[in-house]
Image (cartoon, rainbow, N blue to C red):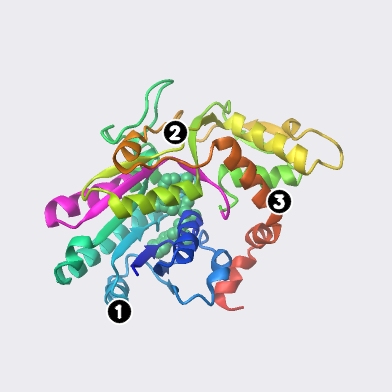
Amino acid sequence: MKTLLVTGGAGFIGANFVLKAVADGLRIVNLDKLTYAGNPDTLSSLSRDEGHTFVQGDIGDRELVAALLKQHSVDAIVNFAAESHVDRSIDGPAAFVETNVVGTLGLLECARDYWRELPQGRRETFRFLHVSTDEVYGSLGATGLFTESTPYAPNSPYSASKAASDHLVRAFHHTYGLPTVTTNCSNNYGPFQFPEKLIPLVIQKALAGESLPVYGDGKNVRDWLFVGDHCSAIRRVLEAGQIGETYNVGGNAERENIVVIKTICALLDQRAPLASGQPRESLITYVRDRPGHDRRYAIDAGKLKRELQWSPSLTFEDGIAQTVDWYINHQPWVQRVLDGSYRMERLGS
Ligand code: NAD
């Protein structure tokens, strides 16, 4: 049985990854600082599972990370931990550099020192998998796709900090031989996403009959991937990815933001009509665009398909319908995020 050190495993994608990995019999040591984005509620079903050890801490805490690697005899690291919200990076970039760049550097140094000491056999199979974003590539025009050889051109403090972390991972492979793999994924959606991100924000506001803010003209395009598919891609890369390589992960599901919002409105009108009978599309309000808002992201995930036989299992239409249903059926989870009580839990109050 393999033991993974998963960082950021109380966040949206990390928690989805941990829940599935534990169910599949992997042993998980989950290191998470529990910033506002870390939610212990999401992991409550694992409280008695011996396959899951939760540790509250910072990826940049070298002493702690070194001790965890040794104590749990870790076979691989999967690094999800990050500050991840573009709007927050515009308001306060320093935290993004602190965790995404300096924190990742600390984690890499600990991984390198631990890996060097591993006995032969385990040294060859050890992996450091770094989870990154397609936003490092910048913005596309109306045509074209990001490939693994697209030059980096990050435009937000968030994507700049992720780009820096990707470069450090690359450098640790080339300089020290650390067996790294990196995934660059498009926008995720699905269960347990913090309701500050577009899809859960719109679902929640639309359920409440509140106005639905749309940046600019709503025609910014993102390539959407269901979170379970992102997690399955990471597992595949961990199993069979080539050391030192990067893999783009995408859903072949480019949609304008306005189309995503209208799709959610239509699904909610069918499943939970407003008492007034008002169609939810009428709640859409265009607001001033985000500064530096990238126009279009689109991923060519052909390398992952060709080399590792991975493709997404869900279409956008199926994934978004499942997601809308999940939010309708998990309102207590959302309400505890919105009223802040999910943060009280960790403080024991
Ligand atoms: P998230 O914000 O939901 O979760 C991040 C988690 O990291 C939280 O639990 C937080 O407490 C933890 N964390 C933050 N700083 C930490 C630190 N210094 N030490 C330890 N833990 C810390 O993010 P997410 O959406 O789940 O994204 C996870 C990863 O995937 C990120 O690296 C992000 O860049 C990448 N990614 C996200 C998307 C997306 O659409 N959400 C797409 C592609 C890539």
Relative to 191, does residue 52 appear above or below in the rendering? below
Tag in front: 1 or 2: 1
Q: Residue furthest right?
A: 276
Quarter occupied by the C terminus: bottom right
Question: Could you tell me residue 178's position as x and y percent?
Answer: 18, 58
Question: Could you tell me residue 11's position as x and y percent?
Answer: 49, 59
Magenta highlight range: 163-192
Question: Could you tell me residue 173's position as x and y percent?
Answer: 18, 53
Cβ of mark 2 under 8 A from ligand 1: no
Q: Is residue 193 left or right of residue 76?
A: right
Of pointers 1 and 3, the one earlier in the residue sequence: 1
Of pointers 1 and 2, the one earlier in the residue sequence: 1
Q: Amino acid at mark 1?
A: Gln
Residue marked by disc 3: 328
Q: Alpha-carbon distance for marks 1 and 2? A: 44 Å
Where disc 2 sits, the SS reads loop
Residue marked by disc 2: 292
